[in-house]
Image (cartoon, helix red, strand yellow):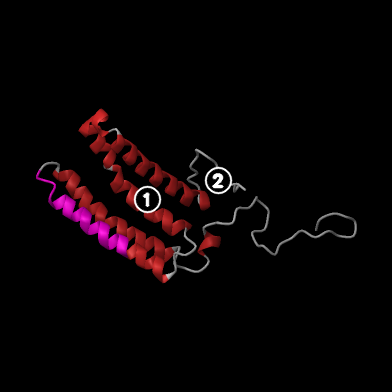
Amino acid sequence: MAQPWARPSAVSWSAGPALWVGLGAVAFDMLLAILLTSAVRLRIGRRWWKGVHWLAYAAWPIALFHALGTGTDTRLPLQLALYAVCLATVVPAIWWRLRHGGPQRLAGRVWGVVASLAVPLMLVAFAAAGPLRGGWAKRADSLPHTPGQSRTAHSVPTSNAQGGEQ
């Protein structure tokens, strides 16, 4: 059964589950573009292939925010360890890549260093303010509802003696 907030081919940037699912869809689409361009690399040329492959640097933080926002298991020690291992692996790899990238495009390398420092800090701040606190699913509006309808599972309309709802 399809969820009311899940619509094919559409990413909703409103707060709630559609935002987190949308981030996952965007990250997946970026990785799919990388995969597809790898399959046709000789036909599209190195310049186009390399340009698309820069999406990997953007897909990584988008996927991490998706995982934090949608994950009902975000607070589990194993999941937190996976996030930490991801950060401890990817950030030094980015620094190594930036260090060995050659003297050209210095501005891009500086932005890469700034982003590689800013993304983990934003991720930790977001996690502390949201997913790691109790009640995240409710605050993130992970239970779809219609306006005016209660979000609690125990709220069931009752009928009065005249047959109308109370």
Residue 76, percent across and down? 44, 69
Q: Are marks 2 and 1 in contact (CB under 8 Å)?
A: no
Residue 32, percent across and down? 37, 41
Looking at the rendered structure, the secondary structure element under dot 1 is helix
Q: Who comes first in sequence, dot 2 or dot 1?
A: 2
- The quarter of the picture where residue 132 lies is bottom left
Residue 49, percent across and down? 25, 35
Amino acid marked by disc 2 = Ala
Is residue 63 located in the magenta-colored stretch of the structure?
A: no
Above or below for 138 versus 2:
below
What residue is rendered at 53% in x and 61% in y? 137
**What residue sits right under mark 1 in the picture?**
62
Q: Classify residue 65 as left or right of residue 157.
A: left
The answer to whether residue 16 is visible is no
* Neighbours of disc 1 within 10 Å: few (<14), some (14-19), many (20+): many
Residue 12, percent across and down? 50, 44
Q: Classify residue 159 as left or right of residue 92.
A: right
**What residue sits right under mark 2 in the picture?**
6
Looking at the rendered structure, the secondary structure element under dot 2 is loop
What residue is rendered at 42% in x and 53% in y? 66
> Most prominent secondary structure in the magenta stretch?
helix
Range shown magenta = 85-103
Mark 2 vs mark 1, CA separation in Å: 19 Å
What residue is rendered at 48% in x and 42% in y? 11
* Neighbours of disc 2 within 10 Å: few (<14), some (14-19), many (20+): some
Amino acid marked by disc 1 = Ile
Single out the residue that lies furthest toward the bottom. Answer: 77
Above or below for 129 versus 22:
below
Nearest to the observer: residue 156 or residue 41: 41
The answer to whether residue 53 is visible is yes
